[in-house]
Image (tube, rainbow, N blue to C red):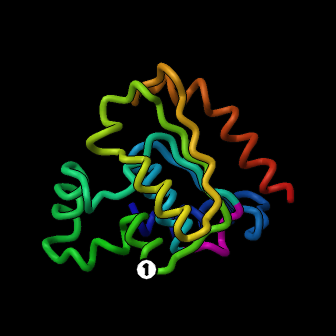
Amino acid sequence: MWSYVTAELPELIAGQFPVDPARQSILGHSMGGHGALTIALRYPTRYRAASAFSPIVAPSQVPWGTKALGGYLGDDRAAWRQHDAIALIEDGARFSDFLVDYGDADQFLNEQLRPELLERACAHAEIPLNLRRQAGYDHSLLFRIDLHGRSLRWHAARLAA
């Protein structure tokens, strides 16, 4: 998925639509949300906006993330750092600002998602973070449907600048 999202998809879109490469944004949900954050951190001049719904922010520090990273990248934990938002920030990566939405009823919130780690890392690195805890929402499709419009307006404001 990494090469598809970072290379193939942008080429496909540029080949079909009149896009301004200086006006791009990226967003995702769960591991896709984490991917959006890491891609923005690794390509900070490509994107004006990056947001995520319920991302795992530190996969190398949580059970599901260590299983996934180990499965995708092997046992070399140093290689994992390029695919871990918190590690990227600790290693000096920066982005202009992030929008992250979580549901306070998300069953993965405390053990897997760990938004407080992103909040702490962004504060330490002086990266603006708009972290919104949404009352009553879990990890489901309804969460994304209900909040997608607000997220898109946030992106539109940054793309218009």
Query: Magenta residues, as a range?
Result: 43-48
Q: Nearer the viewer, residue 124 or 143?
A: 124
* Residue 1 screen position, x and y as percent: 39, 60
Query: Viewer-proximal residue, 114 or 29?
Result: 114
Q: 57 above or below 106?
A: below
Q: Is residue 118 magenta?
A: no
Q: Nearer the viewer, residue 121 or 27?
A: 121
Badge 1 element = loop
Magenta span has 45?
Answer: yes
Main structural element of the magenta stretch: helix, strand or loop?
loop
Examine the image and state in which quarter residue 134 appears. Answer: top right
Question: What residue is at 22 percent from the left and 70 percent from the top?
Answer: 73
The x, y position of residue 155, in whole percent, is 72, 49
* Residue depicted at 51% across the width and 74% down the height: 42
Q: Which residue is mark 1?
A: 91
Q: Residue at x 58, y 38 (%)?
A: 132
Residue at the spot 26% in from the left edge and 42% down from the top edge: 111
